[in-house]
Image: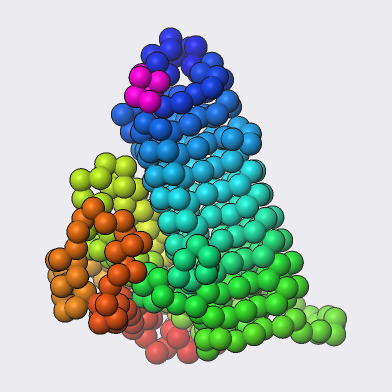
Amino acid sequence: MNAESNGGTLVDELTRRGVRMEDPGSVHIGRDVDPGRIAPGTVLHPGCRVTGPSTSIGPDCTLGAEGPVALHNVRLGRGVRIASGSATDAVMLDGASMGPQAQVRAGTLIEEQAGGAHAVGLKQTVLLPFVTLGSLINFCDVLMAGGTSRRHHSEVGSSYIHFNFTPHQDKATPSLIGDVPRGVMLDQPPIFLGGQGGLVGPRRIAFGTVIAAGCICREDVTECGQLVVPAQPQARSRSYDPARFGELGPRIAANYGFIGNLLALRVWYARVRAVFTAGAEYAEACRVGALELLDGAFEERVKRLRQLAAKVGAAPRDRHQRAFAEGWASREDALRAFRSGLEQMPEPGGALGEVLDAADRETPYIEAVRGWPEAARSAGTEWLDGIVASVMDIGTTEDRNHG
């Protein structure tokens, strides 16, 4: 159904609202779209397809400047740019951007002034403010933070991949590049992942890390300010049985840590970002969309661990693997109970509560966080660290050390 088969109704209404279309006849607006959720000042270039009842497009977005764009159930903030490609079940906040041939798949959250160049594929990925991806990148199951501004940001070089699928055919492999408790404070040193490289998940990479170009990183980097250079391994072969799992302890711990960071970010959206979006229609739509997305990300990670437990349980190699497989059902129940309990968590107190109580709700989120005193940042980090630690505790010592 194109603009003409709509009888011109939706297109005409958008035009009256101040949405700009150079060639209205080439723009597809689905019948399930609420035109009241597409803001004045948005530019829809020829070839745009906009569908989905949840779609919300904030002011001054530019879509399709370099080719067709297909959007379905996306929430976009102010001034978002997508040159060409597609985005589905995703959220992009103010000033986020994606270059030509983007593929932004379900579960992707791109925060303020973050984004990628051309031919970037994202799925189940969270980019905190300012994170910049080069070209020809595939990121699935990643959370990345770091940097203090658009000029001082975490960056991923071109032709980079996060390896998230194992020979065991599972995806319990999420990687934390930076973290949420410190990353949301916008005061951490950036992380640099050099081009023509890759990260074998699940990994944990500390703030300030530089991974040189051409390096396939297979180890955690837990100390800040490290340089990782490519090794020159001797190629060799050995017997391999994909039905046998090796040491799983660090991998399971990485999954619990990732889930803890997702829940910490969800609490941040529910209790902190809400202060700066109240009454702002398009910003609030993005915040609600992010909460839904993070709930979906939680479900994704739990599902992947459940699948891993089933695979391991089919042929456990030792008592630790058996303990993980047999104990997973109770761990899942505990994770869900903890997730539900976050709804009753009290509002943040101390120095963070004071700055939130005194906050000017008209101040943009980035500007507000940058203006917080150190005591408020420290209190916020401690608060969020507590959420992550609680999730890690659910793993128990037995789960974290099997293998």
Q: How many marks?
A: 0
Q: Is residue 140 above or below residue 286?
A: below
Residue 298 in view in this figure: yes
Outermost residue, top side: 7
Q: From where the camera sits, is residue 53 visible?
A: no
Report the residue at 71% width, 61% height from top. Answer: 159
Range drawn in magenta: 13-18
Residue 82 pos. (x, y %): 54, 42
Taking the magenta stretch, the answer to whether it contains residue 271 is no
Could you say which is closer to the camera, residue 324 or residue 264? 264
Give the left or right position of residue 267, taking residue 344 as reference: right
Image coords of residue 204 (percent x, y): 53, 78
Q: Answer with left or right where residue 235 lies relative to residue 309.
A: right
For the point 35% across and 19% down, the residue is 16
x and y, in percent, of residue 44 in the image: 50, 29
Residue at left offset 38%, top offset 38%: 59
Residue nearest the viewer, comparing 294 with 111: 111
Quadrant of res 275: bottom left
Q: Is residue 66 above or below residue 234?
A: above
Q: How is the image coloured?
A: rainbow
Is 16 colored magenta in this rendering? yes
Q: Position of residue 26 (x, y in %)?
A: 56, 20
Q: Is residue 380 depicted above or below 144 in this figure?
A: below
Quarter of the picture holding the C terminus: bottom right
Task: Tell me the residue at 53%/74% (across/down).
Answer: 190
Picture quadrant of residue 347: bottom left
Camera-nearest residue between 36 and 391: 36
| Majority SS type along the magenta span | helix
